[in-house]
Image (spheres, rainbow, N blue to C red):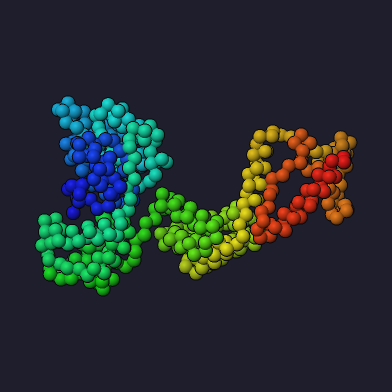
Amino acid sequence: MRPRTLDEIVGQGHLLAPGKPLRKALEAGRPYSMILWGPPGCGKTTLARLCAHAGEAEFMAMSAVLGGVAEVRAAVAAAKSNRDLGKRTLLFVDEVHRFNKAQQDAFLPHVEDGTITLIGATTENPSFEVNSALLSRCRVHVLKPVSAEALLAALQRALTDRERGLGARELTAEPAALERLAEVADGDVRRALTLLDIAADQIDDGGEITFDLLRSVVSESFRRFDKGGEAFYDQISALHKTLRSSNPDAALYWFCRMLDGGCDPTYLARRLTRFASEDIGNADPRALAMSIDAWQTYERLGSPEGEVALAQLVLYLAVAPKSNAAYMAHKAARAMVESGGSLPVPLELRNAPTKLMKGLGYGKGYQYDHEADQGIAFDQRGFPEEIGEQVFYQPVERGLEIKIREKLDWIRQRRREALAKR
């Protein structure tokens, strides 16, 4: 059922609808080098084949998983022979992101001089996985998961097509059954057609594919989740951002999506613990302790029981008051340390374990705060003299930090007044 024309491709209307630049280029017979970035089963290989057909070019395909520099050289040699005969060559490289830099660089001169038109397919973000030299010589087109509506059209066509599909078997299907297949396929045309084929094998010619029949075909859904890939980072980003915006329901949804896709729960525990410190901090210090408790609970119970503790943590973090004041204070302090050089510790703050050190003034003038009025020696410096007193930590007006801010404002004011009198 591979599409033979642009009109037979389901989905990708943002690229292939009438009047779109890519479609116009193909209709004019001018395919160009490009990177096709999209999830599995969205039509990358099919589109590459149609590009070759549109340009009346020989279609050559190779997989970056199995190929290497030798295979690239062989393909280039064949393309040069085609060029000498006045024929164009389109080289399709599946999973181009798996080539290393040297292998990707091997294409550059031949793309530049027109020996080959290169189309690379990748499920990974080409900004990270394809080197900049090659990327600059190709246009990047983003292919989207195929919508359920478009998948339904592909399934109906496969049922009725007598030449390439199941039409000769005169099968029918309940609308609910096809809708379920489209849902389970999760944007992947290849998966949808494979599941339809499996279901058709369960019945005789002239039979009906029912919703009940699909129970034996589809045991579970297949949500997209490429561990370590683009969808992975998109989903962890969604989890962080919905936690930060205090949306417990959405945060729990993304947490469950990641577990459902096979994410290691200990990875989620680690990210949630970081969130407790970075985005909640002293607005609710209990969040960090609860994160460690939930993490340890999971380690003791394992899956699936321990996942409930992590889900409980997700909900708590979402509704907790938020503050990034500790994170920003740490960032500001590090920046000053990195730019300030090795400034000496004030003498009164230095350790003086020997007579020599005491003789040099180490520790002289230090005030033991527990013996000071109100337990704080306000006129005692805390920073190197060269930079003076600094303020990194700015508590927000949320949660416990409301009280912390009130106390810090009072302490800092008293310290400024006391140091001004020294």
Residue at horizontal 14%, vertical 61%?
Answer: 160
In-image side of 295 versus 332 (left or right): left
Image quarter of residue 363: top right
In-image side of 345 versus 24 (left or right): right
Which of these two is toward me, 35 or 404? 404
Image quarter of residue 162: bottom left
Vertical position of residue 326 compared to residue 422: above or below? below
Name the image quarter holding the C terminus: top right
Please provide percent x and percent y for residue 330. 65, 46
Vertical position of residue 104 compared to residue 150: above or below? above
Please provide percent x and percent y for residue 302. 50, 65
Please provide percent x and percent y for residue 153. 22, 59
Query: Which residue is at the far front?
Result: 19
Query: Which residue is at the far bottom?
Result: 212
In-image side of 292 versus 132 (left or right): right
- Tell me if residue 356 can be seen: no
Residue at horizontal 26%, vertical 69%?
Answer: 176
Residue at horizontal 38%, vertical 38%?
Answer: 130
Tell me how many marks there are. 0
Residue at horizontal 57%, vertical 55%?
Answer: 275
Vertical position of residue 240 compared to residue 44: above or below? below
Please provide percent x and percent y for residue 306. 51, 67
Name the image quarter holding the N terminus: bottom left
- Tell me if residue 399 can be seen: yes
